[in-house]
Amino acid sequence: MSQANIPNITPIISLTLGGTVNLLLASIALEELALAHIVNAEAEKIQYVVGTLFPAVTPPTTTISNLLLINDSVRKTLQDVIKKEMLLQFKMENILDHFPNEVT
């Protein structure tokens, strides 16, 4: 086997301070959108199990133990979403602390 050959790539990237702030804020917005999709998926999971997602779809046979398992799964996922929300809040606060004049 031969050694991998990585070409010498030297891209020139130039960003202004305002452009950097915009990219940071856009990254937060995209992460928030992804988290919103996760929350929506978890809500649809519960709606499917209890039979309120689609009128034409018959839900699976639900037992108390199945409901508790789904509830536990959703709870754990939402806990992770909340942790990520806290990290995004810290990220936003850091941006506002370091670039207060650029954001306003």
Image: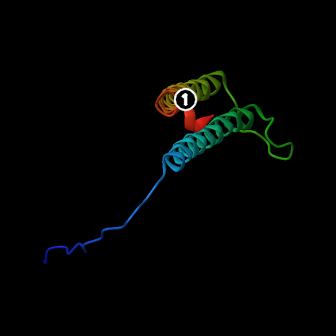
Q: Classify residue 16 as left or right of residue 104.
A: left
Rendering coords of residue 95 (x, y %): 50, 33
Foreground of the two, 82 or 42: 82
Question: What residue sits 79% from the left and 39% below the top?
Answer: 53
Rendering coords of residue 8 (x, y %): 25, 72
Q: Image quarter for residue 3?
A: bottom left
Q: Classify residue 41 as left or right of residue 20.
A: right
Question: What residue sits 75% from the left and 39% below the top?
Answer: 59
- Count up the numbered dots: 1
Give amino acid for label 1. Glu
Rendering coords of residue 13 (x, y %): 41, 61
Q: Classify residue 35 as left or right of residue 7.
A: right
Q: Could you tell me which secondary element the residue under label 1 belongs to?
A: helix
Name of the residue lying farthest toward the front: 101
Question: What residue sits 48% from the left and 51% below the top?
Answer: 16
Q: Image quarter for residue 73?
A: top right
Foreground of the two, 32 or 67: 32
Residue 63 sits above or below residue 28 on the image: above
Q: Image quarter for residue 2?
A: bottom left
Rendering coords of residue 36 (x, y %): 65, 38
Residue 24 sits above or below residue 99 on the image: below
Foreground of the two, 75 or 8: 8
Q: Classify residue 64 as left or right of residue 23.
A: right
Foreground of the two, 81 or 61: 81
Question: What residue sits 69% from the left and 32% below the top?
Answer: 46
Name the quarter where the C terminus is drawn. Answer: top right
- Residue occupied by mark 1: 85
